[in-house]
Image (cartoon, rainbow, N blue to C red):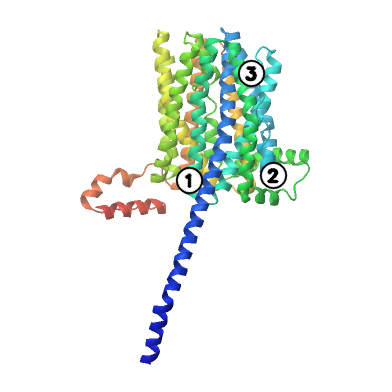
């Protein structure tokens, strides 16, 4: 037995080097595989961000520039800008279901290559301009649904951290374009409106090929993007029949879905004139604010919105997406309420009115986009893959419907001195969204106000913690962790 042990020890000493070398090679190969996967993931994200940046930049520049061009033609009324925006929203409401059907049934690459680069000369009559803008709007909606609600989930491959990172970065790109795009085009417009029109069209045409190339590279680098869609499109019905089925059945399925309330609350926030959209831009110009100043103010608002893309993930990581959503939404309601109050102050000068309203609206953007990220996480986690397009298309249709109602309010009250009425309607819409989301939070968590947290000081002195009867598991874990820290 001793001889056998000795032989085994010799074998280990003589052959152990080979075993250690094999283990080392295995570790090296594993490390190389991880590094290769990380490099591939980084390359995919870079291509996705590039395509999204170009698409969003052109969309934001055109969106803002069109209202500047209309305001220069019709400086004393909000009516043309409202009709223009309402037409875009109406087409989006009527045809968003078709875009959702396409996202669910057709290969992802063909969906994302639907052009959203319809630029036009603002010297054309208003009706053709509205129709071209409606086509641009539909392309933008399909691009957003496909990339932000479907592609990023497939690219994340089930990783919550990667999904949160992709969501935040895509939103930063969008908000950066809202910051820089309007700022650039507003200063060009201040020099020459015709030059601004030429610049808008030229940038759009120059970026089309780059957008197509980068998004195609992403598609072919991520197998899930083609595999899932090939499976879902195998039994697809004819286009018109399938679109009508989606249009008729989509809304009931959307309303019955568990993620309906946060999605509907987010859509309701689009019924507002208290943001740097066409109505408020035209209003500020009408009371004497220059187009360059409007661009700067919108840029400041975009900085606040960008801060939400960092604050939102941090807050959601600490307290969860559901609780973070109610915090952000309440902040927005408080700021919008202050902005609305300035319109009803008697004998307020235009300078004070503009300064107070703009300051409150700028601050409200932090709450808006923080809640947007929270609601997006909830929807992405709860909506089934085969229903993402249909669900998101219904949400976008409602967003455009509420946006259309906002423009309808400035059609009914077109004069700048009547802007306080649409502003009040906007505040009521935010309050309604708060109520609906509070119902969702109450149904998920069993409470709105965490009483045990309110009594935290007393419990710290006594070093005792009592969980409420209806507390969720994550709340009990938080209480236990706090007790251990004591």
Q: Which element carries disc 2, helix, strand or loop?
A: loop
- Coordinates of residue 377 in the picture (x, y in percent): 50, 43
Query: Disc 3 designates what residue?
Result: 84
Q: Which element carries disc 3, helix, strand or loop?
A: helix
- Coordinates of residue 303 in the picture (x, y in percent): 43, 27
| Picture residue at 50% right of the left edge, 11% below the top | 285
Asked whether the viewer can see residue 344, the reply is: no
Residue 13, compared with residue 302, is above or below; it is below
The residue lying toward the viewer, choosing from 218 and 342, is 218
| Picture residue at 51% right of the left edge, 57% below the top | 33
Of badges 1 and 3, the one in the foreground is: 3
Of badges 3 and 2, the one in the foreground is: 2
The label number, if any, that marks residue 299 in the structure image: none
Of badges 2 and 1, the one in the foreground is: 2
Query: Disc 2 designates what residue?
Result: 107
The residue lying toward the viewer, choosing from 322 and 122, is 122
Query: Disc 1 designates what residue?
Result: 443
């Amino acid at each position: 037995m001793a001889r056998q042990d000795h032989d085994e020890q010799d074998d280990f000493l003589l052959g152990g080097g080979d075993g250690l070398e094999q283990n080392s090679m295995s570790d090296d190969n594993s490390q190389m595989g991880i590094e290769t996967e990380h490099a591939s993931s980084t390359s995919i994200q870079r291509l996705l961000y590039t395509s999204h940046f170009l698409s969003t930049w052109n969309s934001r520049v055109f969106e803002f520039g069109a209202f500047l061009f209309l305001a220069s033609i019709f400086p004393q009324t909000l009516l043309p800008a409202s009709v223009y925006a309402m037409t875009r929203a109406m087409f989006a409401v009527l045809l968003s279901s078709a875009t959702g059907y396409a996202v669910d049934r057709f290969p992802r690459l063909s969906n994302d290559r639907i052009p959203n680069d319809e630029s036009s000369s603002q010297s054309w009559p208003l009706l053709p301009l509205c129709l071209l803008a409606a086509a641009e709007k539909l392309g933008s909606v399909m691009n957003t649904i496909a990339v932000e609600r479907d592609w990023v989930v497939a690219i994340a491959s089930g990783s919550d951290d990667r999904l949160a990172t992709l969501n935040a970065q895509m939103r930063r790109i969008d908000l950066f374009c809202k910051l820089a795009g309007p700022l650039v085009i507003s200063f060009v417009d201040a020099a020459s409106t015709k030059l601004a029109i030429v610049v808008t069209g030229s940038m759009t045409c120059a970026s089309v090929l780059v957008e197509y190339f980068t998004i195609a590279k992403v598609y072919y680098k991520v197998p899930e993007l083609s595999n899932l869609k090939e499976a879902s499109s195998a039994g697809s019905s004819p286009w018109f029949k399938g679109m009508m089925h989606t249009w008729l059945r989509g809304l009931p399925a959307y309303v019955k879905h568990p993620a309906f309330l946060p999605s509907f609350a987010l859509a309701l926030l689009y019924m507002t004139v208290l943001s740097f959209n066409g109505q408020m831009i035209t209003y500020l110009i009408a009371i004497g604010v220059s187009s360059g100043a409007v661009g700067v103010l919108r840029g400041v608002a975009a900085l606040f919105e960008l801060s939400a893309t960092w604050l939102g993930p941090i807050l959601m990581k600490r307290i969860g997406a559901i609780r973070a959503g109610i915090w952000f939404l309440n902040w927005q309601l408080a700021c919008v309420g202050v902005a609305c109050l300035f319109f009803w102050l008697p004998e307020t000068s235009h300078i004070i009115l503009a300064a107070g309203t703009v300051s409150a609206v700028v601050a409200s953007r932090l709450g808006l986009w923080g809640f947007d990220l929270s609601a997006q996480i909830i929807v992405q986690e709860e909506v089934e893959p085969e229903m993402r397009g249909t669900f998101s298309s219904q949400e976008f249709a409602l967003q455009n419907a509420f946006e259309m109602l906002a423009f309808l309010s400035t059609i009914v009250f077109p004069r700048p001195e009547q802007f306080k009425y649409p502003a009040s309607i906007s505040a009521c819409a935010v309050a309604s969204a708060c109520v609906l989301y509070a119902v969702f939070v109450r149904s998920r968590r069993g409470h709105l106000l965490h009483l045990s947290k309110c009594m935290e000081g007393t419990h710290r002195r006594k070093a005792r913690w009592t969980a409420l009867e209806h507390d969720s598991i994550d709340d009990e874990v938080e209480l236990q962790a706090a007790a251990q820290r004591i």
